[in-house]
Image: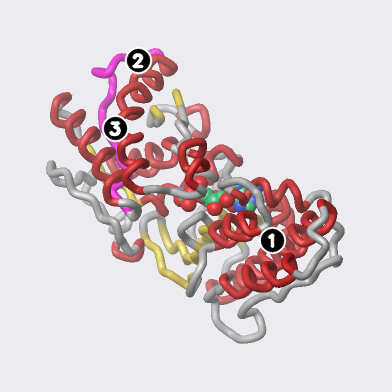
Amino acid sequence: MAVYDTDLAGIDALRAHAVYSQIALHAEYGGVVPELASRDHVRKLLPLIRQTLDEAGMAINDIDGVAYTAGPGLVGALLVGAGVARSLAWALEIPAVGVHHMEGHLLAPLMEDDPPQAPFVALLVSGGHTQLVAVDAIGQYRLLGETLDDAAGEAFDKTAKMMGLPYPGGPQLAALAEQGRPGAYRFSRPMTDRPGLDFSFSGLKTQVLLAWRDSDQSDQTRADIARGFEDAVVETLAIKCGRALEAAGTNVIVVAGGVGANKRLRARLQEMAARLGGRACFPRPALCTDNGAMIAFAGALRLQAGQRSPPTVDVTPRWDMATLPAVADLPH
Ligand code: KG4
Ligand code: ZN
């Protein structure tokens, strides 16, 4: 949940920002249980709105527009958010717009100082997505490549679970990898030996499973395997990012989504972009993982461009980002 002030610029425009994490809830079950997730949304949404407004020092009537996640994602959770957002807009007689979750991630780096200008390439790496997207303009996206099976974050989470780490394993596996010896385990860089910008991470998970099963399963081995796995994922993502930049004819890469918080990925892509005379842009880690600020920001851009969603509680659980209207093309 966030309050974004379009009269201000950059991160200062974020008047308030609160995240309620369902990690503790999901950890109990080792993953997301959709029905529990939506019921928890029902419980937490209104208190979180009050808390965020308090933090911004604002009353509900001070809000000029509402942005909510309309998809893609779990239909139950999306409907809770859309229902509350539409009701708020209706009661306050203000416009509302449904935001594409991945566009929220993609635009998050633009909230930071000195934001990149389109055209650039975006690497979207979350628990549900791994995509390379050519951003010709804000709102105008071309899919260059995506995963054919597991998402990068999902691969982190499943691999971590296999080695006995609690949910969500990604950040824990990355922390463990810091104690691992580079090169002690070497896993393949899937699909880098052939042209194309698609990914596949499910085979890597199997390689790790076999290595772990046949090992002494000591703490050092677990860390060594974690390091080998992280290096394989980071290197694979970096190789494909390099190719995507070449294909799109730009040297600016923007990284977003939960895995964008990974330190080694950040360092590796920064080094690559510097070598190309360009730059790699990341949001701060708190804006990489799911957050309300990115939805408020993307929604504010679209509302300012005159876009509104119809006053019905509609969500789009499966939604292709390439079908979004370009922000510049929207009626003013
Ligand atoms: O974008 P996000 O918060 O939620 C989705 O929309 O999926 O991404 C969550 C994913 C999880 O799979 C989590 O394990 C991963 O991002 N993640 C990380 C790190 N922090 C979060 N993976 C690797 N290294 C990290 N530091
Ligand atoms: Zn996300």
Distance from label 2 to label 1 (Cα)? 41 Å
**Residue carrying label 2:** 58
Identify the residue at image location x=34%, y=55%.
Answer: 72
The magenta stretch spans which residues? Answer: 57-71
**Residue carrying label 3:** 42
Instruction: Judge the density around disc 3: few (<14), some (14-19), many (≥20) Cα neighbours within 10 Å.
Output: some
Distance from label 3 to label 1 (Cα)? 43 Å
In the foreground, 101 or 172: 172
Quick one: SS at disc 1?
Answer: helix
Q: Is residue 261 above or below residue 235?
A: above
Quick one: SS at disc 3?
Answer: helix
Identify the residue at image location x=19%, y=31%.
Answer: 89
Distance from label 3 to label 2 (Cα)? 23 Å
Closer to us: mark 2 or mark 1? 2
Q: Residue furthest bottom?
A: 194
In the foreground, 207 or 281: 207
**Residue carrying label 1:** 273
Q: Please state if 206 lies on the left or on the right of 92 as rendered.
A: right
Residue 97, magenta (yes or no): no
| Residue type marked 1 | Ala
First in sequence: mark 2 vs mark 1: 2
Q: Please identify the quadrant where the C terminus is shown.
A: top left
Q: Please state if 79 lies on the left or on the right of 194 as rendered.
A: left
